[in-house]
Structures are given as structure tokens and as C-alpha cells.
Amino acid sequence: MSEIWDELDQLLDSRERVAMATLVATRGTTPKKEGAKMWVGEGGRILGSVTIGGCVDARVIEEAEEILAAGSAKRIAMSLSDEEAWDFGMSCAGTVEVLIEPVALGEPSDPVVQAYARVRESVAAGRHAIVVSRLDSDSARLVIVERQGRSGTLGSTDLDAAAVAAAEGVIARGSSRTIELQLGESTIELFFELHGPTARLLVFGATTVAIPLVELARTLGFRTVVVDARPRFASAERFPNAGEIRIGDPAEIAMELPLGPTTCVVLLAHDYKYDVPILREVLQHDVAYLGLLGSRGRGRAILDFLREEGVPEEQLQRIHVPVGLDIGAQSAPEIALSILAEAVAVRSGRGGGKMRARPAPGA
């Protein structure tokens, strides 16, 4: 969901009215998850996508002009044939639902503008936040911030309370979703749009592999930090798009950096005097991914050393060494790709196997 902030920044500069389309439900497997957004401006400007192109995005663009003129939201559902689903990126036929709403970006009082401003602040502070919207009415927004309460309203205190109760499950599940809530004799559909702290990639060792690794990680939405003791290597010239460059003793810097469930750590220095103390520190935290560059032999030696120091076996199993998926990587960019592919797979709870080896839903 990190791309939403880049898109919003571009749109807020123009202060135009836009139609905001949100993917609120899918039936089938698709590369776009619930919460994916597309923005269509009054002048025809388009940012983002609720699919990977094709019939659904085209339908959204068609509907946008009418929605902007009418000033009211519309929910559309599209049933896809097998052929259309394949074009959409789904493994089999199914249904997608998209909520399209007018948003006055130039109006600070617009509920959507207010909601995303609150969410951005919360995410920057390291907290999860959920934007809850009704699928049967216009614009109403309730923002629920992890351990910080709520703001806005869905129009009823009882409904707000029910939404807050359901939010805990959404955070635990880790993804946006549509939920039906029973309120008295009425069933109300709400969309829970989950936002979490930006994923971070900490790279220890400003090596040749680190350069494409940082570039690719930035494309994938990671905030990157490069750490090295050598100023000539850890420079802005070599890493122009790094979020942060830290120069000094890597082990000491590792103790200063935030380490948690949204952090991936990769050690590329290939130097025992740095690798071992960094691993000691990182293993004390519940990071999303921990990869170590090196051969199997070198990896065994480091694991044996840490094992003899008393590091529990279950912690040692968290170290991915040799780092990366086996894609036959040879060049620095290929090695960087294999590392990030493994990191993404581990974060998603996947093994990184071939897509065709997994049966399609319902098969």
C-alpha cells in the first residue's frame, strides 16, 4: 500500500477533484490485493490501477466522469470469464468489486483527505491504521489507529464500536478486506483498508551487490538503510536513492536501528568481525527476514560458532544462508533480485517455489 502516498502527493499538488477507485473484493487469485487504488482526474489524468490493466480499469475510467459529475459514489461488480480473468491476472474466472468515489483533494474537510492525513501520521509513527468505509453510503470514514483510538465516524456510534471490535482481526490477518457486520436487524458491509509501517531493508555492507539491492528495494516500496564502516563505499554517489546511509561500526549501529516485524536485514560485508556481532543483535528481535551472504561452508561455520555461544537453534534457523533464492544468479543485479525475492517470499509465508507447482484455487 506504500504507493498510495506517492500518488496522493502528486494529486494534492494539483488540488483537482478526482474519482478514487478502490478494489474492495475479489473472488479468485489476483496480483492486486484488496485496497489497490486508481485515481481518475477531471482532466483525464490517471494514476495507479485496481488491476493489471484491461477491462476492469477501463470500466473504472468510463464510470469516473459520471461519478465526478453526480458527486456520488458507486460500487461496481464485474464477473469475469476464464479468458478475461487470465488477462486480469487471476488463475480462474471470478468476480471483482470496485468502489468508486468522488474526492475533493483541495478541501481539507473532505472525509477521505482527513482520513489519509491521519493514517499517514500514524504509519510514520510506526503504528498500524485502518480506514473503514461503508459500501452503502458516500464518503463516511472511520480511522482506527493501533493503540491510539479512533477518529471520524461511519454515522452511528454503535456501528463505529462494531467496526473497532472487528479491526483487531483485520490487523492480525494482515490484509485489507470487506466484512459484513450485523447491527440490529441490518447487515452492513464495511471495507477495512489496512495500512502498516513502511517495510524497511537494512543492508550491512556497501558492496557491489548492495547497489542494485537498494535500487530494487526502493522500487518495491522498502525504506532502505545502508550501513558500512567505510565512507568511500557508503556514499551518496554510490547510493543516491538510499533512504539513509550510516557510517561507523556496523555492530554498534545495529543496536541503534529499529528492528521489528516490518524490517528485513541483509548482511553483505562477508566479514566475520562484523557479521557475528550483527547477527547476535538482530537475532534478539523479531525481524521479518535475515539473510547472510556467503557459501554453505561459511554459513555452517558462523552458525556453529553462534551455537557454541549458546544461541538457541530456533533462532539460528531464522538465518538464510546462502542468502537468496536459487535462480542461477551470477551478476550483482541477479543476486540482488534473488535476495529480495526470498525476502518477499518469507514475509508472505511462502516457500518461493514455482507458481505452476501450486494448484489453482478450486482445482
Image (cartoon, rainbow, N blue to C red):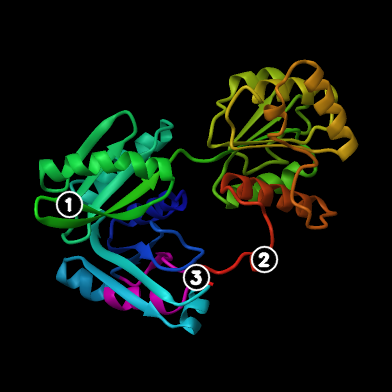
Amino acid tagged 3: Gly
Circle nearer the viewer, 3 or 1 = 3
3D distance between C-alphas at marks 2 and 3: 15 Å
The answer to whether the residues at label 1 and label 2 have Cβ atoms under 8 Å apart is: no
Of circles 2 and 3, the one toward us is 3
Say few, some or many: other residues with alpha carbon within 10 Å of mark 1 (under 14 / 14 to 19 / 20 or more): few
- Where is residue 37 drawn, in percent x and y? 38, 60
Q: Residues within 10 Å of mark 2 (few under 14, many from 20)?
A: few
Q: Which mark is residue 332?
A: none
Q: Is residue 122 left or right of residue 154?
A: right
Q: Residues within 10 Å of mark 3 (few under 14, many from 20)?
A: few
129 is higher (above) or lower (below) than 341 = above
Amino acid type, label 2:
Ala
Q: Which residue is mark 2?
A: 357
Give the structural element (helix, strand or loop) at label 1: strand
Disc number for residue 362: 3
**Please, which residue is most extreme toward the right here?**
297
Image: magenta residue range: 43-63
Q: Is residue 85 magenta?
A: no
Q: Residue at x 46, y 48 (%)?
A: 2
In this rendered view, identify the residue nearer to me: 175 or 70: 175
Give me the residue at 72% from left, 29% from top: 316
Q: Is residue 264 above or below residue 358?
A: above
Residue 182 is tagged as 1
Residue 10 visible here: yes
Q: Earlier in the sequence, mark 1 or mark 2?
A: 1
**Residue 357 place in picture, x, y as percent:** 67, 66
In the rendered image, the quadrant that contains the C terminus is bottom right
Q: What is the residue that sits farthest to the front in this orientation? A: 363
Left or right, residue 114 beside residue 91: left
